[in-house]
Amino acid sequence: MNKIHVKTNINGDKVEFLADPRETLLDCLRDHIGLTGSKEGCGTGDCGACSCIFDGDLVSSCLVLGVEAEGKSIETIEGMAGEKELHPLQKKFIEMAALQCGFCTPGILIAAKALLDRNNDPTESEVRYWLAGNLCRCTGYDKIIKAVMETAKDIREIA
Amino acid sequence: MAKDELAKEFKYIGTRPARPDGFDKVTGRAKYGADVSAVGMLHGAVLRSPYAHARIKSINFEKAAKLDGVKAIVTRDDFPVGIDGDTLKLLENTIAGKFAYYDGHAIAAVAATSVHAAKEAINEIEVEYEVLPHVIDVDEAIKPDAPAVRENAGDFSVPEGSSPNIASYIEFGTGDINDGFDKADLVKSGRFKTEAAHQGYIEPHACMAQLDHDGQGEMWVCTQGHWYIRQMCASVLGLEASKLCVTPSEIGGGFGGKTTIFIEPLALALSKKSGGRPVKIVMSRAEVLRATGPTASASMDVKIGITKDGCLTSGLVEFRMQGGAFGGSPVGEALQCAFASYNMPAVHHIGYDILANRPRAAAYRAPGSPMAAFAVESLIDELCRDLNLDPIDVRLKNAVKEGDKSSYGPKFKKIGLIETLEATKDHPNYSISLGDNQGRGVAAGYWMNHGGETSVSVSLAEDGSVNVTVGTPDIGGSRASIALMTAETYGIPYNSVRVNIAETGALGFNEPTHGSRATLASGKAVYEAANQTISEMCQRVAKKWQIDPDAVFWENGYAKPAGPNAGDFSPISIKQIAAEMDQTGGPIAGHHEASIRGVGHSFGVHIADVEVDPDTGRITVLRYLVAQDAGRAIHPSYVEGQFQGGAVQGIGWALNEEYVYGADGCLQNAAFLDYRIPVASDLPNIDTVIVEVPNPDHPFGVRGVGETGIAPPLPALANAVAAATNVRLRSLPMSPAKVLKAIKTGSDGC
Amino acid sequence: MAVNVYLWNSLKKFTNDQDELTIEAKSIGELLGILERDFPGLKPFLDSGISFAINGELSNPNSNEPLPDGAEIYLMQKLKGG
């Protein structure tokens, strides 16, 4: 099968790669560009460990084909921190011990950022339902939800 | 350690600093099992049996070998012969010989230049199977006329003439149980069933392995215990252990499921056959569920006697557990936990480890304890409800304490069950009022914890900061707890300590991060190694001051004269000592190797509040409390994390999770959609109370905490549902359909 | 020195129906040797790996370890964790 030349923008950088048309965006990020922060937990869109922002939308990158990235703008966990410091969510997760093994953490951070970018005053229930597509097996979600709510509070105070 | 020394305030222990690997993990920088690649790397794929039980008549991979990009294919013929005992079972599970024993059993493996090429090759391998009868359910498998899963499965413990699928048998007890039942005012018995559950780690197994013709091998693998992986791979492949270097990646969850081998020997064998190219294998989620190591399913009979004022008089349990096709269900541990929380004059335990055509069970967080807790704690709750007694008061009345003989024999040393029960009773959650269709359940749980083989080293850097090297992979924050204990021992800032997890060649043997042992065992060993360096530093300072080494002591990062008689010397800091060490005798380092003892047991008590929808049978968890004895919480946030994580796994097991098999013996729900673990919207906050009854045998009072938390939820939720609906479910999971049927017909779900 | 050894019931058929034994042994290694010699039926159990509880403390066996006089020793199945 011939590979397809894809030109795209990832975390603000112009990127090109050759994609087998059967490859998912997740495969391409990890194997062709070396961005291994997004993880495969299931390959079927059930666990959210591969969460990315695809043209402004929160997606499971295991359900997007690599070739669909042509001309699009993609944000992954590697682009979340600023040049000089971590994103408030990243800082809060460390501070509040909202991760244990850390495998689900990139997906959860991307998803949580997508929520707070839209709504910086979610209720606890809204946070829980928004993150229902991100599986975590270590934490029981308690500290994750608390970290997102606290970050939302900090963001509102600065705004 | 003297009790009053334990009572002093610590400077670093008990604080909540940022974990050292936090930055890497929130930025995606941390490297897990599948996150590496190498020049010339091949991708591996595995052909797996589509049948629950079959004779493998032939394997023909001629066509597959000719495909573009295929560089190596291995079958059982590529593995050594003449292996027996437990190693043979490991090898059989790694790759089938004459028989496929379960749906998903590995038959052959391919390495090719791309994942797609490897998968295409798998499809071209021709296998001739003769399908054989299979058995899945534990109570079916124990029947004398059940299809035999394997020949000669029973070991030396199994009585003659037993069913062919009984792999081992255990019986132990004390006291006269019949006398105990006679003395009881109420005796109740019941059968309780739990289904197989998977540890459910989000990271699938992954490794990259290289094995050259000279027998030197390297492997990068996500594992809880790389020395175990080295030992197991060496034994099934006939390699010399020290020639195989295993490096642990960061690990995306284990819970016991990553303490053994699955794909690792296949990757090594493929590498060797391809001429030494690195081979990467990553399991799919379906492969993880079908072909790694879920825990056992259990069918348990319990009989308990109680007096009307709440004294437990007698207990009898018979547990039947299936651990897959190779045995090894945690029935022994389950029996040990069954009555462990209670001081009962007479107890008797019988257990059967039974085979079924299912994957080989691996450990899952306090293996056996959740099943035992479900059976015993549910029945105790039934007794309490029948006699109208408070469930915490009854547990307090019978709770074990220091000096009591345990249900499995040895006397308890210092333990904290009573303190934990009291903390639970005092908690506001116990008195919040409940509404219609709501109910509260209480249950206790226990895990022995483990010490085990540990090797660590500690060294001083030139600037007085400290490197600690351990062999226990960091699954949930143990770098932080080890750094805190090191900082406390030296009296230096937490940020001056760096903890590394080294590969197998760098240290002596280490048991995995399992058995709730990392903080306890690595911590205790690091304490010893650190004290060696402190002793060396004091000696060097004593020489400098020209006084007796006994006249120098260490405090808060400084060597100090022991008293005015020692001399009027200014304290010398670790920084100064380190800066001069090349001139005062050379590098300063310490090491410690031991089979760590002084383990402290951890008891937990949970309260669950639920609401049951009478129209759909759906259970909503309204409120959940975990109280557990941590001995000493080194980093309280990560202790809370273990409590919460364990509780939620238990909640999933109680409400949603089960292995569903079809009539053909194949797994029906091999994906996260249908193997449904809890999601954020299923749960409330998980409230926690850290009880501290320090373990007198640990320098900082630590008790392992990771495992106990998964046991109480199974009975706590069943007890809450009984309180909410007046219906007792004795079979897990309590799915809505099962609950609805119970509400309508009074069935117990079995 | 004499130590008290407790076995689990299903082992009784190999020890003339006794589950409590008093044995003169100075170390774990010596104790295991005596058990194997006097009760050969126990050998497969001892070989398969067992844990010990010595005066309430659970551990893996160390054959060189000296035993305290009068110690209470429970033989148990080898423990795992998860």
Image (cartoon, coloured by chain):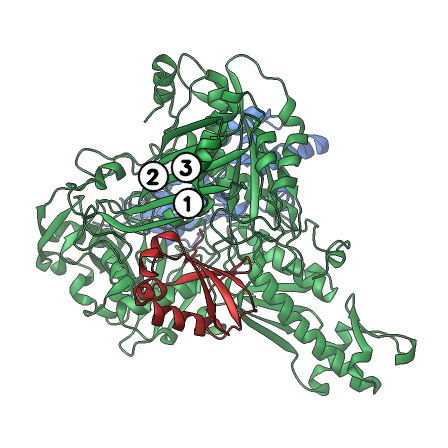
Chain colours: A blue, B green, C red
B186 or A52: nearer the viewer: B186
Which chain is home to disc 3?
B
Of the residues under marks 1 and 2, which one precedes in the sequence?
A: 2
* Label 1 – label 3 distance at C-alpha: 22 Å
Of the residues under marks 3 and 2, which one precedes in the sequence?
A: 3
Of tags 3 and 2, the one toward the viewer is 3
Residue position marked by numbered label 2 in the rendering: B298
Q: Position of residue B405 (x, y in %)?
A: 54, 49
Which chain is home to disc 1?
B
Of the residues under marks 1 and 3, which one precedes in the sequence?
A: 3
Q: In this rendering, does residue A31 appear at all?
A: yes
Q: Position of residue C32 (x, y in %)?
A: 41, 70
Q: Quadrant of residue B718?
A: top left
Q: Tell whether B63 sits left or right of B325.
A: left
Q: Which mark is residue B178?
A: 3
* In the rendered image, residues at marks 1 and 2 fall on the same chain: yes
Residues at discs 1 and 2 in contact (Cβ within 8 Å)? yes
Looking at the rendered structure, the kind of residue marked 1 is: Ala
* In the rendered image, residues at marks 3 and 2 fall on the same chain: yes
Q: Quadrant of residue B464?
A: bottom right
